[in-house]
Amino acid sequence: MSEPAKLGAVPPGGTPRRDPWPAILEGLRGRCPACGKGRMFRAYLKVADACPSCGQELHHHRADDAPPYFTILVVGHVVGALILLVEELWPESPIWLHALVWPTLVLVLSLWLLPLFKGALVAYQWALRMHGFEAEGRAAASALRTSRT
Ligand SMILES: [Zn+2]
């Protein structure tokens, strides 16, 4: 059993550290964290097995429940604050308007944010060599050591 990766630590095998921020920005754009050219998703929320541009394997990700968690966190705070603001500024607002606007806003924001958060989280896992991305780094470092000898 391996120890969990520490943030900023040099991974075993001496593989080079990846800067998470450029990878996260590419992930937010739905692009491959390795090359920034290939699309990360083969469908709305389905991560491609590998980047079509550089071949970087992406199926190792374990985003799991984190993208919906962050989506609910952000959408809940934004829409909740807006509901309170509208109630404060316009207390006689018709109920039908609330029934129409808030669910629509929640739906649109959630569908927009889900792939952004998922892309960013997959890219973050890639940058930190988490899960299967770590073994991939070890294989590359091993191949590099072998080629030097
Ligand atoms: Zn790529």
Image (cartoon, grey):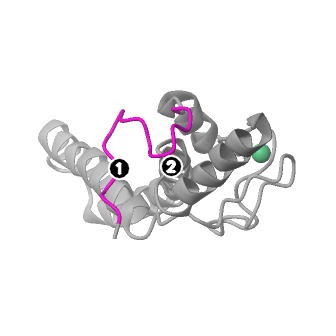
Residue 132 magenta-highlighted: no
Q: Decide if residue 26 is on the left or right side of residue 53.
A: left
Q: Residue at x 30, y 60 (%)?
A: 98
Q: Residue at x 58, y 36 (%)?
A: 23
Tell me which image quadrant ligand 1 sits in.
top right
Residue 4 magenta-highlighted: yes
Within 8 Å of ligand 1, the CB of disc 2? no
Is residue 30 among what the camera can see?
no
Of callouts 2 and 1, which one flags the residue occurring earlier in the amino acid sequence?
1
Front residue of 113/129: it is 129
- The kind of secondary structure element at disc 2 is loop
Give the spatial CA distance, label 2 vs label 1. 8 Å
Give the residue number, with chain letter if any, for mark 1. 5
**Would you place residue 3 above or below residue 34 in this image?**
below
Residue 79: x percent and y percent? 29, 50
Res 95 label = none
Location of the N terminus (image quadrant): bottom left
Three-letter amino acid code at the position of disc 1: Ala
Magenta highlight range: 2-17
- The kind of secondary structure element at disc 1 is loop
Give the residue number, with chain letter if any, for mark 2. 129
Q: Residue at x 76, y 65 (%)?
A: 42
Three-letter amino acid code at the position of disc 2: Arg
Is residue 86 among what the camera can see?
yes
**Would you place residue 132 above or below residue 87 in this image?**
below
